[in-house]
Image (spheres, rainbow, N blue to C red):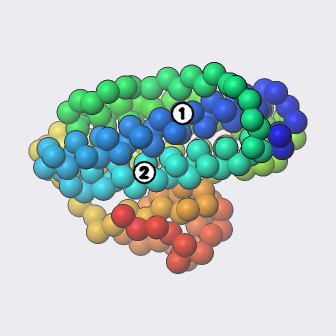
């Protein structure tokens, strides 16, 4: 295991579980949004699901391939609902990560000198701030009976940075080049 401290390892496993669940939940909710007549909101869910997969992969990598049984509890909204309600569940989950979970995990990793975990938590925290805002914009549109308006959603495959329409020359979070961004 590349992580030396048990607390940081537990936090990585917890974050991995939460990001993995968010990935699958957002894929499901994206399909539901499309069925409800919100294809762009569906694409937003799909794109952010990919960002959550990036976060889960980063956390898993930092665990270092440890093979062991670990109970991973990931608390969040579970099950399908209407798009407006699913967006509220997404907003609540993202805000939990931004306001509570990742700041604590990041501080612990920093205190324990776990550079890789610190980087992984920082990447996720910065992306989740954007996700909360985008889901709020989507919810406002859906409440008005409208879809979001954008050409594409772009995700940095290194850190999960998320932006609409045009990627920056370099990712503002991790420095990845523009041409690496994945478009949805």
Q: How far apart are marks 1 and 2 (CA)?
A: 14 Å
Crowd tier of the residue under label 2, counting other residues whose Cα lies within 10 Å: few below 14, some 14–19, many 20 or above? many
The image shows residue 77 at horizontal and vertical percentages of 39, 25
- Residue 48 badge: 2
Viewer-nearest residue: 64 or 157 = 64
- Residue shown at 61%/35% (left/top)? 15
92, above or below 130, in the image: above
Residue 169: which quarter of the image? bottom right
Quadrant location of the C terminus in the rendered image = bottom left
41, above or below 105, in the image: below
- Residue shown at 47%/58% (left/top)? 162
The image shows residue 143 at horizontal and vertical percentages of 17, 39
Is residue 126 at least partly visible in the picture? no
- Residue shown at 23%/38% (left/top)? 83
Q: What element carries label 2?
A: helix
Is residue 31 at least partly visible in the picture? yes
Q: Mark 1 points at which residue?
A: 18
């Amino acid at each position: 295991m590349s992580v030396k401290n048990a607390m940081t390892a537990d936090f990585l496993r917890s974050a991995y579980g939460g990001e993995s669940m968010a990935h699958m939940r957002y894929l499901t909710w994206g399909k539901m949004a499309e069925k409800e007549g919100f294809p762009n909101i569906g694409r937003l869910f799909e794109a952010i699901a990919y960002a959550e997969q990036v976060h889960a992969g980063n956390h898993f990598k930092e665990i270092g391939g440890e093979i062991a049984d670990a109970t991973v509890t990931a608390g969040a909204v579970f099950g399908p609902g209407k798009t407006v309600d699913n967006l509220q569940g997404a907003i609540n989950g993202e805000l939990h990560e931004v306001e509570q979970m990742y700041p604590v995990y990041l501080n612990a990793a920093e205190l324990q000198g776990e550079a890789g975990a610190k980087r992984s938590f920082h990447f996720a925290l910065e992306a989740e701030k954007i996700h909360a805002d985008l889901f709020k914009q989507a919810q406002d549109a859906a409440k008005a009976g409208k879809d979001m308006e954008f050409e594409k959603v772009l995700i940095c495959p290194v850190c999960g940075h998320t932006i609409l329409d045009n990627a920056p020359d370099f990712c503002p979070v991790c420095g990845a080049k523009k041409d690496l961004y994945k478009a949805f």
